[in-house]
Amino acid sequence: MKNFYFKHIFVLFVFCFATYFSAFSQFKITPYSFNSSKENTKKSNKDIKTTFLPFIDDFSSYKENYNNGLWENKGALFNTNYPIMPPSVGVITLDALDEDGILYPLANTTGFACDTISSCFIRLDSSSKENAVLLQPKDSIYLSFFVQPSGGMGNLWETIGSAPSKKDSLVLQFYSLGDNSWNTVWKTEGLLLDSIYSKDSNYWLKVVIPITEDKYFNNSFRFRFVNFASLDNNPSYSYVSNCDQWHIDYVFLDKARKFNESIRDIAFVFPAYSLLKQYQAMPKRQFTLNDMGDSLNIGIINLSDEALNSIYKYVVFDENGSEVISYDGGFENIYPYSTTKLLQTNSNHAHPKINFSYSFNGDNWTYFDIVHFIKPGVGEDENTKNDTIVFRQIFENYFAYDDNSAENGFGIEPIKNSNLALGFTLNEEDTLTAVDIYFNSTYQNANEKPFYICVWDSENGMPNDSIYHSYEYFTPSFDGLNRFHRYYLEHPLLIPKGDFFISLQTKYADYLNVGFDRNTNSSYRTFGNWTNAWQRNNLFEGSLMIRPYFGYKAIIGLENIAQRENFSFSLYPNPAKTKINISLNDNKWTNSFSSFQIRIIDMLSKERLNKKFTTSIDVSFLENGIYIVEIINKKTKHKIREKLIIRR
């Protein structure tokens, strides 16, 4: 899923919110396709789609062309993870970040225009293409939508994303063809969700705008949302800024409407999640029956003003599209949310059982798609786009608690050698080769501070002794919104069965802001250490976006390191028996062999050879197996690696 950004950062305990923002987009099955990004679509007027009434989009249907041509978008984010109790699954979010997840370059403390999302052309001169009837102001044409400021409710540590400040604003404008201008018809200043909820226990502000002026009744009517944001007036912009997030949902424009009408619609509210007990993803070889969850939490809403009957089921498909198992929740009554303020409460629909276990064939990575369906038991649904949600269960070579969306950030205490650790469990020993981390993008690259990667064993469920500490430090890399960056260990590390911890350790007294997913919770496995004592995170619910990567396939990616250092080498023969030859693949290095050291490391992380570089090496002392050959530039400390196989 753009999958969440952060730009508003402060520290409390070891927790630090960062205004970043990403979304794991859900797509209908057939084909199984996932896409999530901010899209900046630059089109001429002739390329923009024209449509007739009704115009309706609840941002729940995501495919390759996820908005179905209804929108021209500059920086806004389609997502399913940031809002609180949306009218239906999926919203569009406007914030202070551009389509690449970077703070707009004109950002300042007084205010600046940010994201804009504009509708396609809408025919308000005619009711339909087939039977054209002139539309007029008396035809009761209303535009309605729901608005929610980000930030969540309650205590500081319960916030999700970052609320707009009072001087920020969200604006709705109509396009007038006659004078080629955009006219503001509605706006709101920054506000808190608590102020909306306190009035009538609704999480969203519903806005209904009548269209009555003759100048809009033509073949080129459009409307757009624009947000204006501002940096917090803080002397340290490097760490603190304002994300100013607004969520918009269920945009509906049609004729013959009533001001307070409801819509006959049973919909999913939340995205689909993993069927595993702890993880959103895990290595295939580590999976056991005990990793399966017992039941799911499904949010289903009735948006009409009368009780309805609904049918719910989910189906699990393998990577070939074949059905593995299905669950049928049967028929259940669901009562109007407008009067009950409740989602579906019947456990057959709200908490369906997980009545199977995954099984695999072969050693290759695989995935399953869990597809959930809801529909009325009697009659028709006026909007079927929000009746399907999908989760892709990935079994690759990494563990993930997070859902790939960083609603906030978690900070390492700015004390030298502070540690922030996340725990995992191996069901059998495995070889750790890399760690994937998502660091939030920050204003003026303030997050680019050195850190070390450490690995700890466990005692009584807490980090105990250090079993690995990177020799060289790393620097946070932002590869795009919710895109993890892979940090390779200096040598593979064999970790025994049981609990272990990955920690990030500061080199200096710097803040480090790691992506923090608020939709999944692994806080019980999160620890901080900045006073020579480990402390569990008992306050902030969520998951650090840190993913340990196991197995030899990660080693294949090591050539990327060589590319960054502008040189590489080849081994031959490979597989080898008693001798290997080394050829540097750049002639400019051949006259400086004295600058290099060569090491050979086995899969138990033991150093088997360490000597000055030569182009021919005796390896007859090595047993059959897989090894890492590492060449180190002694001047720059850079290193490159290749995999070596000994086979006799």
Image (spheres, rainbow, N blue to C red):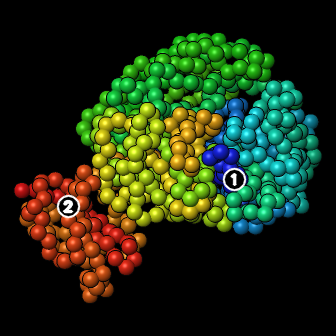
Which residue, as the protein is rendered here, is positioned at the far front? Answer: 532
Q: What residue type is labelled 2?
A: Arg
| Cα distance between the residues tagged 2 and 1 | 46 Å
Instruction: Point out which mark residue 608 bears.
Output: 2
Question: Which of 626 and 457 lies nearest the eye of the viewer?
Answer: 457
Q: Residue 310: percent from the left, percent from the top?
A: 61, 16
Q: Which residue is drawn at 68% across and 46% down?
A: 12
Q: Is mark 1 on a helix, strand or loop?
A: strand
Q: Residue 364: percent from the left, percent from the top?
A: 29, 43
Visible residue check, residue 303: yes
Find out whether the residues at labels 2 and 1 contact each other: C-beta distance under 8 Å. no
Q: Which amino acid does label 1 sit on?
A: Ile
Question: Which of 86 and 144 lies nearest the eye of the viewer?
Answer: 86
Q: Which residue is drawn at 78% across and 63% down?
A: 235
Q: Closer to the observer: label 2 or label 1?
A: 2
Judged left or right of residue 141, residue 74 is: left
Visible residue check, residue 570: no
Q: Residue 304: percent from the left, percent from the top?
A: 74, 21
Q: Earlier in the sequence, mark 2 or mark 1?
A: 1
Near mark 2 (Cα within 10 A), the count class, few <14, some 14-19 or many ≥20, is: some
Which residue in the protein does label 1 denote?
9
Image quarter in which the C terminus is found:
bottom left
Question: Which of 9 and 358 lies nearest the eye of the viewer?
Answer: 9
Compared with residue 159, is residue 628 higher up or lower down, i.e. above or below?
Answer: below
Image-quadrant location for residue 230:
bottom right
